[in-house]
Image: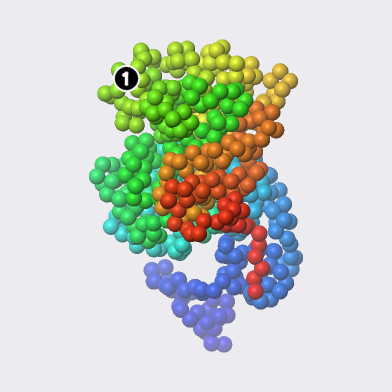
């Protein structure tokens, strides 16, 4: 027998790959049409054992799969059974990410059908732990990593991504991941998780979504010294170097994907987040979920909560713990909605809203030393050093935590606000669960079961005095997927604040009397696709009204149109 024919298991080694030494170069040849073995390894088209007999014959799959043919539903039951066997949430997260890399449609089917169980796994709080350990659990690349090494070549890097028709980009620089701080390049878990929700909850096609991490270094010494760290081992770029890098990125995105790609800034530090939104809000279609998405979902919760406690937005007094992106973003949207409702100047409306930062109550006397985004909230009042004194001085009806610090709504604070409110509204919004300002059990116990309570991360129902209280979850996942779908389907070219108010309004309208009876101010996540369709329709309607929509003609029934645009994870039949 010819020697050449025996190399590599009896097949001629045409390209010399099997005979090459480790030092020699080989060419990674592949085929372009997915069939046979390649089809089983393409997550977009792979159906596993759900390939029919005819498909196995037509696509050269005979012998590559066991003989059994199963349904997608059976596959779903099997995977859920396996995932529930894992004791640790991080193991479940890794199992889900593995499935996403193997079988895309099954991953989304699982997530849509089991959203309440799996949302905390693929997103907060588990995604926070995944980002902290991303270097250790990293197996396959997801999304684009654009580092300072690529400066001057960012457009080329974008062209390396296989998809050309991108509608939504979620980008982070990893400096302020949830409440966990600077995680550098390992923040990639956040854009990946967010875009999974854009598809599962908002119906944006997976192929139209692009997660990006901008690696400009990290100031996290622990990561810089970690042998498994996957990013640049250098301190963060700042100042002009950072600004130039971001500017090149934004210009390259627009050049490569056009005017109508939605760029969502995610988990940037305060000092950059506000600047980026201000700088690119007039030239690009940009959205900051931490500032605008959080504000929109909290405003929706407050509007719904008023049906329980009574009064209008303007008749309540608000006190925030935390004056960063989330706190000031929520405060501004509340003031904007108040101004719309009462036809009062926004400056007047801001006076109903008070913020406490690490140095105490934000008051006029501190104005000179405040960052620019805090200045509108500096009102006339004596300086108060801590939250408890601020609660007693301001006597708020609504207490909102966006501090990123756990256990800051102490028993004294909750008891104080409960002493002058029949039903205090308490929102402990910091993520993940460990950073929540107080737990659901603490809020209901200390307020003697009277608090209208919601959090950023999920908490179990609490029994107090024989009544079951179900805490709401002010999760941005209520807003951004539907908001993104509305922007995409209308072909909007800019994001306007009125579109955020439209999203809040649509979400608040989805809370039913049955939800209110349980003390809920948000609808259950099990209906999230229906909710997202209504949000998308409201956002699109506002975009058309403002003259920002480019997709013509405007569909007659926007809710039906939104539903028709949504990605379906049901398997397709192959010819």
Q: Residue at x 54, y 35 (%)?
A: 300
- How many numbered callouts? 1
Please give left or right for residue 464 compared with residue 281 in the image. right
Instruction: Name the residue furthest bottom.
Output: 1
Please give left or right for residue 271 compared with residue 117 in the image. left
The spot of residue 318 in percent (x, y) is 47, 23
Please give left or right for residue 466 compared with residue 556 in the image. right
Q: Secondary structure at mark 1?
A: helix
The spot of residue 92 in percent (x, y) is 61, 45
Residue 49 visible here:
yes
Instruction: Name the residue furthest front.
Output: 343
Q: Residue at x 66, y 59 (%)?
A: 570
Nearest the viewer among 71 and 335 is 335
Instruction: Name the residue furthest left.
Output: 240
Q: Is residue 131 above or below residue 350?
A: below
The spot of residue 494 in percent (x, y) is 40, 49
Q: Which residue is mark 1?
A: 364
Q: Quadrant where the N terminus lies?
A: bottom right
Q: Where, by quadrant of the figure, is residue 117 drawn?
A: top right
Nearest the viewer among 536 and 63 is 536
Q: Is residue 436 above or below residue 36?
A: above
Q: Is residue 497 above or below residue 362?
A: below
């Amino acid at each position: 027998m010819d020697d050449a024919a025996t190399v590599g298991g009896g097949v001629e080694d045409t390209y010399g790959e099997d005979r090459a030494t480790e030092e020699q170069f080989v060419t990674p040849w592949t085929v372009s049409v997915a069939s046979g073995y390649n089809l089983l390894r393409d997550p977009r088209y792979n159906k596993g054992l759900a390939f029919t007999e005819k498909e196995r014959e037509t696509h050269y799959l005979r012998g590559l799969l066991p003989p059994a043919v199963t349904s997608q539903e059976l596959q779903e039951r099997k995977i859920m059974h396996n995932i529930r066997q894992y004791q640790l949430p991080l193991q479940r997260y890794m199992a889900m990410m593995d499935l996403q890399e193997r079988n895309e449609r099954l991953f989304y089917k699982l997530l849509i059908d089991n959203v309440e169980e799996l949302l905390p796994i693929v997103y907060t709080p588990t995604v926070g732990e995944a980002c902290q350990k991303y270097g250790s659990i990293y197996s396959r690349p997801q999304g684009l990593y654009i580092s300072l090494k690529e400066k001057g070549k960012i457009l080329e890097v974008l062209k390396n991504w296989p998809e050309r028709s991108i509608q939504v980009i979620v980008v982070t620089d990893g400096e302020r991941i949830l409440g966990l701080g600077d995680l550098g390049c390992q923040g990639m878990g956040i854009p990946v998780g967010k875009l999974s929700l854009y598809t599962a909850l908002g119906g944006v096609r997976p192929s139209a979504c692009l997660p990006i991490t901008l690696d400009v270094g990290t100031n996290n010494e622990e990561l810089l010294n970690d042998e498994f760290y996957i990013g640049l081992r250098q301190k963060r770029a700042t100042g002009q170097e950072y600004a130039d890098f971001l500017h090149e990125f934004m210009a390259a995105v627009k050049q490569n994907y056009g005017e109508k790609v939605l760029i969502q800034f995610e988990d940037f530090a305060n000092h950059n987040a506000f600047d980026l939104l201000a700088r690119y809000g007039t030239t690009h279609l940009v959205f900051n979920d931490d500032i605008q998405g959080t504000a929109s979902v909290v405003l929706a919760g407050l509007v719904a909560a008023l049906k329980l406690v009574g009064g209008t937005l303007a008749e309540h007094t608000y006190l925030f713990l935390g004056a960063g992106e989330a706190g000031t973003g929520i405060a501004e949207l509340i003031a904007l909605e108040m101004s719309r409702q009462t036809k009062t100047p926004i400056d007047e409306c801001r006076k109903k809203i008070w913020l406490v930062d690490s140095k105490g109550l934000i008051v006029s006397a501190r104005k000179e030393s405040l960052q620019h985004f805090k200045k509108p909230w500096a009102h006339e009042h004596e300086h108060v050093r801590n939250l408890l004194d601020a609660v007693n001085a301001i006597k708020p009806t609504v207490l909102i935590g966006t501090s990123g610090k756990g256990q800051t709504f102490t028993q004294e604070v909750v008891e104080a606000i409960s002493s002058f409110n029949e039903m205090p509204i308490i929102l402990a919004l910091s993520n993940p669960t460990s950073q929540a300002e107080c737990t659901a059990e603490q809020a209901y116990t200390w307020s003697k079961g009277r608090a209208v309570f919601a959090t950023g991360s999920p908490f179990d129902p609490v029994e107090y005095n024989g009544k079951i209280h179900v805490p709401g979850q002010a999760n941005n996942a209520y807003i951004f997927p539907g908001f993104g779908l509305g922007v995409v389907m209308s072909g909007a070219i800019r994001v306007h604040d009125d579109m955020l108010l439209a999203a809040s309004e649509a979400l608040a309208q989805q809370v039913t009397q049955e939800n209110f009876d349980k003390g809920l101010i948000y609808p259950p996540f099990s209906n999230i696709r229906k909710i997202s369709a209504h949000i998308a329709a409201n956002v699109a309607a506002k975009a058309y009204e403002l003259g920002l929509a480019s997709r013509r003609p405007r569909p007659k029934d926007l809710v039906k149109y939104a539903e028709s645009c949504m990605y379906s994870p049901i398997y397709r039949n192959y010819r």
